[in-house]
Amino acid sequence: MIDVLIAGGGPIGLAAGIEARKAGMDVVVVEPRRGPVDKACGEGLMPGAVGALERLGVNPDGHDLKGISYQSRGLRVDHSFRHGAGRGVRRTVLHAALAEHAADVGVETVHQRVVAVRQNADAVTARLTDGTRVRSAWLLGCDGLHSQVRDLVELGTNTREAKERGTARRGQRRFGLNRHFALPPWSDFVEVHWTQTAELYVTPVSANEVGVAVLGPRHTNYVDALRMVPALAERLEHAESSTSVLGAGPLRQPTRARVAQRVLLVGDASGYVDAITGEGIRVGLAQARAAIGCIIAGEPARYEHEWRKATRDYRILTSGLVALGASPLRRFIVPAASSLPGVYGAIVERLSR
C-alpha cells in the first residue's frame, strides 16, 4: 500500500511525484519508456513555468527567452515578457532534470504500464503489464494525450454522440511535428510564423541548437510547411538536422471530468485544447500542484474546480485563437496583433504567468 501511484513519467508525472514527496507521501511512478523521453512540442517554457520548476528544485539548462514574436508575410509583432525570462529547453533535457530530481527526493520509478484499474472507497488497485498489482490511496493519470488511465476510468468522451461529433470535426484536427537544427539562435524570441494552414514555432533551446515545431492539419508535411515561410526555409537550408522529425496528435483531447473517485487526471491526460498558445508545461505544473494539494486536504472532488481555475485562461484564449485560426479570419491574426499591440501583449502576459 502506497500513498500515490502515478501513471506516466513524463515531465508532469514527475513534477506531480516531486510535489507528493515534498508533502511526505510515498510515490511510485509507472512509465514504460526508459531514459529521457522526447516529444514533438514547441519546447518554450513561459516565465511562469520556469518559476514553477524552480519552486520544485529543478533548473534545466536551456536558452533564455525574451518574449513571443508573431510573424506573417513580412509583418512582425513582438512582446517582451514583463515578469522574468522564459526558457527554451530541449524536451529530453527537461525530462532528464526532472527525473534526476525526482529520484533524489525519493520518487520510485517502475518501467511498466497501468493496464487495469479497480477502486473502492479506500484504495485504488492498478494492474501493471507484468501482472503486478499495486495498491495505492490515490492514482494520478499523467499519461499524456492518449491516456489509458482516462479510458480505464471512463473519463474520456467515448460516447456514440461524442464519437460522431469527433468524426464531423476530423478534418479540423491538428497535429504536431518537431525537428531540431544545429545552428546558433538568431533571436531570443519564440517566433511563431503563421502560414495559410499551419503555425511554425521556432524556439532557441541552447547556444547551438534551434527547434522548429509545426502545428497543422492531418498529413501536414514538415518540409512543405517550412517552404511556406521562405525566409525561415532559407535560413535552415544548409543547417544540419540534429534530430529526426517527431510527430504527435491529434492535439485536441476533450474529457468529461478530471476526477473519478480516487483517480485524478493531470496534464495532457486531463483534457487538451491545442498547443497553439504554447503554455502546456505551465498549465500542467499548476495542475500537478493542485491535484496533490487537494489530496493532502482530503478533498479530491475539489480538484475539478481547481483544474478549471488553473486552466481557465488557457482554455478560453486558446479555444478562441484556434477558432479564429480555422476560420477565414486566420489571415488577419498577425495584422490584428500588430494593430493592437497592447491587447496582444496582455494576452501573452496572461498566459505567461
Image (cartoon, grey):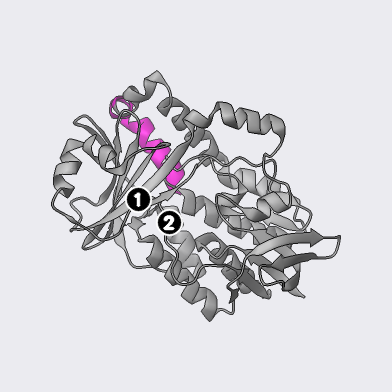
Residue 242: quarter of image: bottom left
Left or right? Give the position of 293 relative to 79. right
Quadrant for the N terminus, please: bottom right
Q: Residue 39 carries which label?
A: 2
Which residues are the magenta region? 335-353
Pinpoint residue 126: horizontal percent, then vertical percent: 73, 65
Identify the residue shown where x is 62% and y is 49%. Answer: 270
Which is nearer the eye, 11 or 347? 11
From the image, tell me which residue sits under label 1.
Answer: 178
Identify the residue shown where x is 73% and y is 47%. Answer: 154
Decide whether the magenta segment is chiefly helix, strand or loop.
helix
Residue 333: quarter of image: top left
Residue 63: quarter of image: bottom left
Which is nearer the eye, 90 or 249? 249
Instruction: Point out the residue furthest to the top here.
Output: 328
Task: Say what secondary structure mark 2 lies in.
Answer: loop
Q: Which mark is residue 246?
A: none
Identify the residue shown where x is 54% and y is 38%. Answer: 315
* Separation of residues labelled 2 and 1 (CA atoms): 8 Å
Say whether marks 2 and 1 touch (CB < 8 Å). yes
The amino acid beneath tag 1 is Asn
Task: Say whether disc 2 or disc 1 marks the residue closer to the N-terminus.
Answer: 2
Task: Say what secondary structure mark 1 lies in.
Answer: strand
